[in-house]
Image: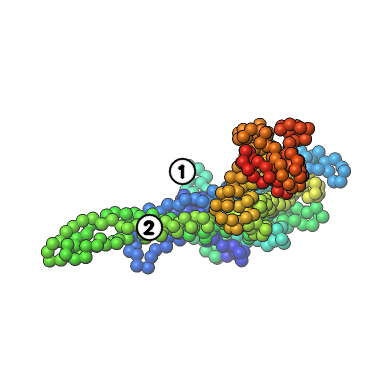
């Protein structure tokens, strides 16, 4: 098979963009390798100056911070594999045992299932897609007399082999189920310590019938390095294994599982342009400061305009015949402030990307910080975004485990019998915190007059808005504070009521609702003492409500009931 045929690319495969996505997440050498892309040269910028500017460049990795934050939220409760029986039947013991084995070692080496799933989700956030192949140990089937011997030797212990997303160059899929894939991998191999290394390029071609591997080996040149592959170069077929995989209905199945996130949930893609723009702006600011933040020598005539020059960066020279003077002029910093403000704006835009993704998941979320209702809507949007991620990941993990169990047990396994638990830690933690805060809020309303005072003042501002003058608002605040002080004295939690307890009696006209609940709440001409006589409430205290207009005193001050 020639290289040209094997190297065909899927229409959506973009090697350059995948390299940029990788560099923004990895940072370090991967980012510096693309400095000419991140920091293009100016049209009139000398080459040496451009190289100096790029050599000073640095990268602050916001991309990985955001992606890892989303991942940590989703994996607060790691995924766990369980197997249940069909209907009311007991789960298959062999399938359950194999599921437990896969949970401990999923990649056939040492990586547990939760770690492999986390890596796959990170890949999907960076590149949009993640790929696993349900693989068998590298053994020859002819070495075993029957299937029982294969099982005892572990030859049927299927495991999950991840493919790096940039290495999957071509595929065909029905929905999220691949019909075939082509994986291109390249690495250096050296047999012995004194042997020359070889560059090995492998194409793994997987479809519904077989797994085939094609190889090209290249020797290192005398001066070092390797020649580029040519289209006409032939690749040797090293492996051709008929796998015979089928789905639960017995139809031929490609043993590769793909997770493809919706475009609106592709974090790396959403961050690509804003992260590149922010990186460029930060380095432009750093370069401007480096070039301009030095005092510059000015030589001018004293008789000319005495005003100091306004400088960004460069040189200034003004000469006259006589009365010349020399001094250093510092840059004004105006241009640098503009660059600094631009960096702040771009950094804010970068972190707003996640909120925009949440808005896409739930249009009811709000963009502002207006009220508690909007915050609840924003949390609901984030919850829906994480739920969408969890649904995508569960479908991917369920199909991979189903295929692996079908190979291990050599029998059909229905997806409904495979359960992926977990991936909901953010919901549980938030619910527990919400319930705890809710209980505390209820206690605060019952026990804290200060809680009622603050809540009442906030409610006044929300309801009245700009319809009251500052003086009226101050008077209302004073009345609320006095009422809260009186309530605190009644419950034994606040300051004593000025004027003594007897001042809680009120007389006047008005409705007699809630008599005795609050000072000044007497009936028509009646007193406001609590039920049962006396000035101390003996029954359950209720939240004061304003009804009618009864003259009386509240907290020792004249007021209205």
Visual colour scheme: rainbow
In this picture, is 16 found above or below 107? below
Residue that sits furthest to the right in the current view: 88
Residue 555, position in %: x, y? 63, 38
| Residue 188 seen in the current view | yes
Quarter of the image where the N terminus is located: bottom right
Along the horizontal axis of the image, is 406 left or right of 449?
A: right
Which of the two marks, 1 or 2, is nearer to us in this view? Answer: 2
What residue is at 75 percent from the left and 56 percent from the top?
253
Residue 234, position in %: x, y? 57, 61
Q: Mark on residue 336?
A: 2
Give the distance between the C-alpha atoms of the residues marked 1 and 2, in whole angstroms: 57 Å
- Choose top left, top right, bottom left or bottom right for residue 171: bottom right
Quarter of the image where the C terminus is located: top right
What residue is at 52 percent from the left and 60 percent from the top?
273
In this view of the protein, which residue sits in the foreground, 368 or 107? 368
Q: Earlier in the sequence, mark 1 or mark 2?
A: 1
What residue is at 26 percent from the left and 62 percent from the top?
309
In this view of the protein, which residue sits in the foreground, 460 or 523? 523
| Residue 431 seen in the current view | no
Residue 446, position in %: x, y? 70, 38
Q: Mark on residue 194?
A: 1
What residue is at 55 percent from the left and 57 percent from the top?
271
Residue that sits furthest to the left in the current view: 322
Give the class, few, some or many, for how many residues have Cα within 10 Å of label 2's Cα (few <14, many ≥20).
some
Along the horizontal axis of the image, is 354 left or right of 399?
A: left
In this view of the protein, which residue sits in the foreground, 179 or 314? 314
- Number of marks: 2
Residue 539, position in %: x, y? 77, 34
Give the class, few, some or many, for how many residues have Cα within 10 Å of label 1's Cα (few <14, many ≥20).
few
**Label 1 residue SS:** loop
């Amino acid at each position: 098979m020639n290289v040209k045929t094997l190297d065909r690319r899927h229409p959506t495969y973009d090697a350059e963009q995948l390299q940029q996505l990788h560099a923004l997440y990895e940072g370090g050498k991967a980012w510096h390798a693309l400095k000419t892309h991140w920091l293009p040269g100016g049209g009139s910028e000398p080459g040496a100056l451009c190289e100096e500017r790029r050599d000073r460049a640095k990268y602050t990795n916001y991309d990985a911070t955001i992606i890892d934050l989303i991942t940590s939220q989703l994996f607060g409760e790691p995924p766990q594999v369980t197997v249940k029986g069909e209907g009311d039947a007991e789960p298959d013991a062999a399938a359950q045992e194999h599921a437990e084995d896969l949970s401990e070692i999923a990649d056939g080496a040492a990586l547990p299932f939760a770690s492999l799933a986390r890596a796959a989700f990170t890949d999907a956030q960076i590149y949009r897609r993640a790929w696993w192949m349900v693989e068998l140990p590298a053994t020859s089937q002819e070495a075993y007399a029957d299937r029982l011997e294969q099982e005892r030797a572990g030859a049927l212990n299927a495991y999950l082999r991840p493919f790096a997303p940039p290495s999957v160059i071509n595929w065909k899929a029905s929905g999220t189920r691949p019909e075939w894939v082509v994986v291109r991998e390249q690495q250096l191999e050296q047999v012995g310590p004194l042997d020359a290394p070889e560059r090995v390029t492998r194409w793994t071609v997987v479809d519904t019938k077989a797994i085939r591997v094609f190889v090209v080996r290249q020797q290192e040149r005398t001066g070092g390095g390797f020649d580029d592959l040519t289209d006409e170069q032939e690749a040797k077929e090293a492996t051709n294994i008929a796998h015979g995989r089928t789905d639960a209905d017995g139809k031929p199945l490609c043993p590769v599982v793909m997770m493809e996130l919706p475009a609106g949930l592709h974090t790396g893609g959403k961050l690509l342009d804003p992260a590149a723009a922010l990186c460029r702006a930060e380095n432009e600011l750093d370069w401007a400061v480096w070039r301009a933040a030095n005092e510059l020598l000015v030589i001018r005539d004293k008789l000319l305009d005495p005003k100091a020059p306004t400088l960004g960066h460069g040189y200034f020279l003004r000469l006259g015949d006589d009365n010349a003077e020399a001094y250093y002029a510092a840059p004004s910093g105006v241009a640098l402030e503009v660059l600094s403000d631009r960096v702040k704006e771009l950094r804010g835009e970068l972190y707003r990307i996640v909120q925009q993704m949440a808005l896409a998941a739930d249009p009811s979320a709000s963009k502002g910080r207006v009220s508690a209702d909007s915050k609840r809507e924003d949390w609901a949007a984030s919850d829906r975004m994480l739920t969408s991620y969890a649904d995508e990941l569960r479908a991917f993990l369920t199909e991979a485990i189903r295929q692996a169990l079908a190979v291990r047990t050599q029998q059909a396994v229905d997806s409904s019998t495979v359960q992926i638990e977990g991936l909901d830690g953010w919901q549980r933690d938030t619910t527990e915190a919400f319930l705890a805060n809710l209980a505390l809020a209820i206690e605060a309303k019952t026990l804290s007059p200060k809680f009622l005072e603050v809540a009442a003042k906030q409610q006044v501002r929300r309801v009245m808005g700009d319809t009251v003058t500052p003086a009226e608002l101050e008077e209302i605040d004073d009345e609320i504070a006095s009422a809260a002080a009186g309530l605190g004295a009644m419950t034994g939690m606040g300051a004593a009521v000025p004027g003594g307890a007897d001042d809680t009696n009120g007389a006047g006209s008005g409705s007699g609702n809630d008599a005795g609940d609050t000072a000044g709440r007497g009936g028509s001409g009646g007193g406001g003492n609590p039920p049962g006589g006396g000035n101390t409430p003996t029954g359950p205290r209720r939240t004061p409500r304003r009804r009618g207009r009864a003259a009386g005193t509240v907290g020792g001050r004249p007021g209205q009931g």
